[in-house]
Image (cartoon, grey):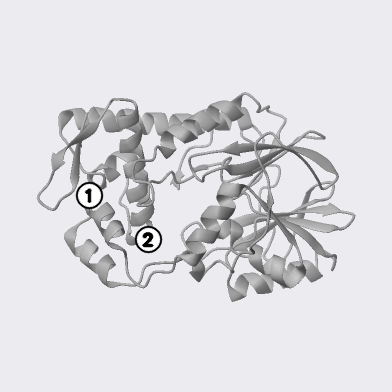
Amino acid sequence: MTAAPRPEGIRHPWPEPPPEGEAVKVAEGVLWMRLPLPMRLDHVNAYALADADGWTIVDTGFDTKRTREIWRRLLSGPLAGAPVARVLATHQHPDHIGLAGWFVEEHGAELLTSRTAWLFARMLALDVQDRATPQQIDFWRRAGMEEARLEQRAAERPWNTADVVHPLPLGYRRLRDGQTLRLGGRDWRVVTGEGHAAEHLTLWSDSDDLVIGGDQLLPGISPNLGVYPTEPGADPVGDWLDSCARMAARAEPRHLVLPGHKLPFTGLPQRLVQLAENHESALRRLAEALAVAPRTAVQCFDLLFGRRIGDGEYGLALVEAVAHLNALEARGLAWPAGTDAQGGVLWRA
């Protein structure tokens, strides 16, 4: 995720997040909590919506011993020992769905998510690899990964979704775009987004100003838009820009957005403009440079991110660079023009 300047008009009603194991009331019957992540983006937000039959938990964090212990403190403390009736995952990424199966198994909760999120999460959790597959290695090579790094990755155990995701249940309740959902004493309109995650759920309250944004609507950072070996020809940047345009037609300054990371905010129309422009400007920079000389995806890091990419960020940078090249190709502005000596695809505009 790339840092970006805050546009004028964005406001954060709460300047600080809740301490670990505690919660902040952000609206009637709605609590905001924060869970740790062992990475550069070191947290994920979770929310609890109160109903007569218990809580609905929105997003869960990784399945780790530490996160489970935090949830036990939250359940006995701010959530006052009331049952967890439902767990809603905004999308399939492990920091959002990692403990959904645990809530189902240990607390009898019902899982709510989109069909694509459930399919992706369940498939990835079952797909455990001890070594990178030939398809992964070929994808990395074609993206321009350096030979030494490629050899290292081929020899080591890759990160697996199952490392931080509790086994997901066989059954779930599907949420779909345009549906009305009753939760937390409110009627919510389900609006799905694309680009960061397929069929990503956002919830827009018909009763007040609340919007549950997940990673589709974030302040201050832009979600990673990546292409992976599972679908190397995907255009998540194009999908993202289409989603921003659709949500901009619905967004109002009054909306209080409850995001998956960072702080709740108002000023959603301005933020959607910035989220779109962040990627449009990256595409312009990329097209201008590729018109001068061809590059692999890895050789585009400096154009896209403007800073040194460390080992911990390399994988996300690579998939996002491929995504922007695919977006230029979808617009007819760039195309593959041969390979370098290591087999990396060279792109030209």
The residue lying toward the viewer, choosing from 225 and 288, is 225
Looking at the picture, tell me which residue is in the foreground, 152 or 8.
152
Spatial CA distance of label 1 from label 2 is 20 Å
**Label 1 crowd (10 A; few <14 / some 14-19 / many >=20):** many
SS type, badge 1: helix
Q: Amino acid at mark 1?
A: Arg
Q: Decide if residue 237 is in sight here.
A: yes
Indicate the quadrant containing the C terminus: top left, top right, bottom left or bottom right. Answer: top left
Residue 174 x %, y % = 67, 48
Find disc 1 in the rendering and name its residue: 142
**Farthest left residue in view:** 341
The residue beneath circle 2 is 312
Q: Is residue 101 above or below residue 10?
A: below
Left or right of 103? Residue 92 is left
The picture places residue 7, in percent across and down from the top left corner, at 54, 32
In this view, 43 is above or below 277? below
Q: Is residue 308 left or right of residue 64?
A: left
Q: Is residue 106 left or right of residue 290?
A: right
- The residue located at (43%, 69%) in the rendering is 128
Q: Is 162 on the left or on the right of 107, as rendered?
A: left
